[in-house]
Amino acid sequence: MKLQPSARHRQRGVAVLVLLVLLVLIGAFMAANQVTLRSLHRELELLDRQQARKYGALAVKPAPASPARTNTIAAPEPPPAGPHP
């Protein structure tokens, strides 16, 4: 009757523990990163409001997205229709 776990079973148990610890650490880093990003976002909004108050209407607003530009050459316009002098 075997009551003691074999060395191979202990190694598997340690590997599972190590993986669980690593997953917990990764989760903690992700949570800390989210908190930091949220804090930075709030600080940027505060700076934006302060600059808008300071500069008023002169504040630069982001330009609307322009359509994709192509590298084609435009064809010349046709001459106007009608009688020629």
Image (tube, grey):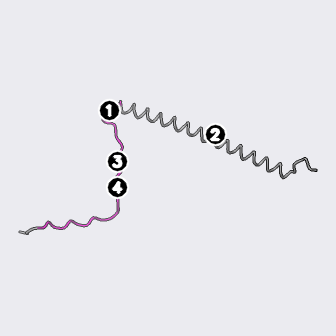
Give residue 48's position: percent from left, percent from top. Answer: 40, 35
Q: Quadrant of the C terminus?
A: bottom left
Residue located 10% across and 68% down the image? 82
Is most of the magenta stretch helix, strand or loop?
A: loop
Secondary element under disc 3, as helix, strand or loop, is: loop
- Label 3 crowding class (10 Å Cα cut-off): few <14, some 14-19, many 20+? few
Residue at figure coordinates x 34%, y 40% from the top left = 60
Q: Position of residue 81 (x, y in %)?
A: 13, 67
User: Depth check: 44 or 18 in front?
Assistant: 18
Q: Which residue is mark 3?
A: 64
The three-letter amino acid code for the residue at tag 3 is: Pro
**Separation (CA) of disc 3 from disc 1:** 20 Å
Q: Which residues are magenta?
A: 53-81
Residue 23 placed where, x, y %? 67, 45
Q: Toward the viewer: 45 or 54?
A: 45
Q: CA distance from mark 4 to mark 2?
A: 41 Å
Q: Is residue 10 magenta?
A: no
The secondary element bearing badge 4 is classed as: loop
In the rendered structure, which amino acid carries the disc numbered 2?
Answer: Ala
Who's the residue at 36% across and 43% down the image? 62
